[in-house]
Amino acid sequence: MKDVSGSVVVIMVPLPAQGHLNQLLELAHLVASYGIPVHYVGSASHNRQAKVRFHVLASSLTSNICFHDFPTPPFLSPTPNPNSPNKFPSHLQPAFDATASLRGPVASLVRSLSLESRRVIVVHDSMMASVVQDTASVPKTENYVFHSVSAFALYWYTLEATGRTLPQKEHVDITELFLSKGSPSLLDVFTDEFLKFMASQHEFLKFSSGSIYNTCRVVEGRYVDLFASVTANGTMTKHWAIGPFNPLKLPEKESRRSAHVCMEWLDKQAPSSVIYVSFGTTTALSDQQIREIAIGLERSGQKFIWVLREADKADIFSGGGEARKIELPQGFEETVETRDLGVVVRDWAPQLEILGHPATGGFLSHCGWNSCMESISMGVPILAWPMHSDQPRNAVLIAQVLKIGLIVKDCMSQNKVVKSPAIQGAMKALMASEQGNETRKRAVKLGAAVRGSMDEGGVSRAELDSFIAHISR
Ligand SMILES: *[C@@H]1O[C@H](CO)[C@@H](O)[C@H](O)[C@H]1NC(C)=O
Ligand SMILES: *[C@@H]1O[C@H](CO)[C@@H](O)[C@H](O)[C@H]1NC(C)=O
């Protein structure tokens, strides 16, 4: 019988960066589909960012999701530095630091909801543990940590941090391959500032009652278990791998969200003939690197859609600062158009729809985890060009463990421009070689298995049901 004193509510507390905002909004959508009210909190501009870029139009977002715009002090929103030796988006740090001011409003919201609810569930990004430090002690409230990166990367970080080594087989299969590619250290892929920010979250993770992953056991169940085993401590014993969070069934052509020009162009291309090129929302490439990519793409002769956007600023809606006009080599766009070789997209691209299109046969990607999960679930093999954070580890998972992708030669050495022949070669390897075809076959197969995991009786569906049953027990 329903408890008359109210029901269960869930609060989502994301880190304000696109890949994180998006994943928790996807999870909000999944949880709300069970009829559970969800509250999504953040600054006004980050909530707006999450909504305008969501795959479902904000107007059709279920009314079960309530957005709370909390005031944050003004924070700097500098332009990204495309020539920085470290590719980590340090220009987002002011927004991360400003989240400290959410602590009070989040605690107040949780207290007021706990008065009228049977249970309050706080799902927070692992990087927002300090913001929710007061909530676990509120009556009827439980905190759960959301991991926005692969379990493989998490496991690897833990081993590195604790000086432990991988089990023998993994050691041989993975570490040496990775090391031979010039494994970037944590200092190479983060900034000092961000490592400190992460470390400052750590002590508050002890308030967590469990972990949620945007991953799927079909993809990396082994690493979910391994990570769980090295972190198992006291009460923190529950782990749910309930990804992919992104939708698995795409809208029919007629009801696509966007009549984006690149979708119309894709409709005219042969199956699996196009590579989608995007380095995500946090990568700012130098002019020289962009030139090399342009030459490499053109010389490869492979069809492509290239999303050429500057990295997000801390506040994507703020004016101010000279917007960078990204220049392509002279004549490039004309040549590409004349030869019908590809499309350059300078606005927001419908990534999931592109990946789900039958003409798309590869993804040249920075290997942000969100992009990896989208590509995996659409059965598209990845040409990995990791930039920072968890991305180099994700690339190893994709290429060496799952064997559903290839790594661009020379891309692991930080602070070096990858030259056009390496890009051209990588394009050919994935899009026009037997090895590429084998890689694509494995990606297609894994994609089908991952989509099946969210069906009735599938493993991710079962974990999602188990999470929902646990919080509404
Ligand atoms: C594990 O639990 C013990 C005792 O509660 C605590 O002292 C220790 O810091 C915990 N370790 C981790 C990694 O959380
Ligand atoms: C790869 O597969 C495609 C489609 O099945 C085929 O047309 C092409 O010849 C194959 N390429 C190689 C090098 O095997």
Image (cartoon, helix red, strand yellow):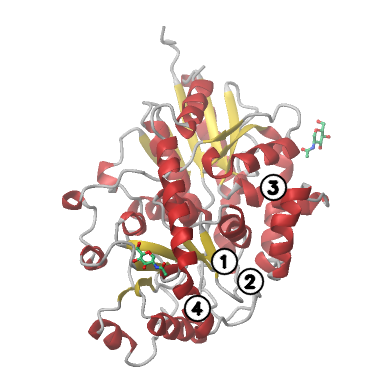
Q: Which percent across, then down, holds residue 7?
A: 44, 19
Residue type highlighted by circle 4: Gly
User: Mark 2 near mark 3, Cβ–Cβ under 8 Å?
Assistant: no
Question: Which residue lies at the image location 46% right of the left edge and 26% below the top edge?
Answer: 465
Can you give x and y, in whole percent of width and height, for residue 457 in the image? 43, 26
Visible in this render: residue 43? Answer: no
Q: Amino acid at mark 3?
A: Tyr
Gap in angstroms between the C-alphas marked 1 and 4: 17 Å
Mark carried by residue 412: 2
Residue extending farthest right: 163
Please say whether residue 30 is visible from this viewpoint: yes
Closer to the chain start, of discs 2 and 3, is: 3
* Residue 425 numbered tag: 4
Q: Whole-Å distance between the Cαs marked 4 and 3?
A: 32 Å
Cβ atoms under marks 1 and 2 closer than 8 Å:
yes
Residue type beneath disc 1 = Pro
SS type, badge 4: helix
Seen from the viewer's position, the closer of residues 63 and 71 is 63
Q: Earlier in the sequence, mark 1 or mark 2?
A: 1
